Amino acid sequence: MPALVTARTKHACCAVGGSVAVIGGRTLVGNVDTTTASVEVLPSGKGAAFVSLPSLSSGGIHGAAAIAVEGSDSAAGQVLLLGGRDSSHVPLSTVQLVDLATGVCTQQPQLLRRHAHPAAARLPDGRIVCAGGVGAVGLSAEVWGPPEQGAQDAAWTWTGLHTMSTARYGGRGCVMSDGRFAVLGGMDGASVGPMSSCEALTLGDSTHWEPLPPMHDARMHFACAAMAGCIFVAGGIGGMDSQSSEVYDEVLGRWLRLPRDLPHVGHVGMSGALR
């Protein structure tokens, strides 16, 4: 695969149309670890390389979650950035609509709490769930969607959800084939390292969290993607297992190690996307 234009960690990443967008993160400027506002994309097509796009108008950000906006009329697509940290490392409750073609960021209704390094995903019905983060918000979860009562065109609002079984930051989230929102791994802030535990949220008449089988390896800040009834994870912070990759088979209800590890060590603060 082609290399990024800018080396970075703890960035946001998602598929936008046939491209992959990489937004913000931490990078070295000289010898200084800096929060960047830079944006780049990998276009679709064989032999394509990453290209730089206009930087975020709102400034540098890292530890945010990225959700592609469906049906965008922007030339390069639009992305929602949820939470994160600014250049002063302050956790954010902001939700920004980013036009990738221009870098212009438009503020959306804010999260109920400040979520830095959260897990987030778009549900099949279009609603967006955001869970976990650094500090006191580690247990919390919320959903953005239309009000339960009101006109169909009423403004979407954030609503609090039941708390998770354990606090998590640096975990990853995805939507399973049955519509449940899965949150994997992360760190609870009190333990000595990453966790392997996982849980899933069912939204509906009996909204609740339930445990999923733990991963083989504890990990945080890793790459995660769901497709074809499976959840794939790779890399992250996990001690000696930072190169490992594994897959959760929803039918079997178990995690299986993949036959090959990542080719390089030190995959910390990485992200991934399906395209």
Image (tube, grey):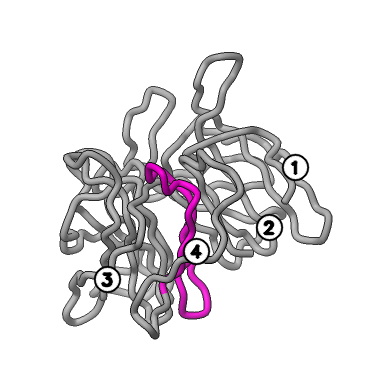
User: Which callout, 4 or 1, points to the residue nearer the camera?
Assistant: 4
Q: Is residue 136 visible?
A: yes
- Over which residues does the magenta segment extend? 224-248
Q: Amino acid at mark 1?
A: Val
Mark 4, residues whose alpha carbon is within 10 Å: few (<14), some, or many (≥20)?
many
Identify residue for label 4.
Answer: 225
Q: Amino acid at mark 3?
A: Leu
Q: Nearer the viewer, residue 111 or 138?
A: 138
Identify residue for label 3.
Answer: 212
The earlier-in-sequence mark between 4 and 1 is: 1
Mark 3, residues whose alpha carbon is within 10 Å: few (<14), some, or many (≥20)?
some
The earlier-in-sequence mark between 3 and 2 is: 2
Residue 263 position in % (x across, y down): 61, 49
User: Which callout, 3 or 2, points to the residue nearer the camera?
Assistant: 3
Q: Is residue 131 magenta?
A: no
Q: How many marks?
A: 4
Identify residue for label 2.
Answer: 19
Q: Which mark is residue 51?
A: 1
Quarter placement of the C terminus: bottom right
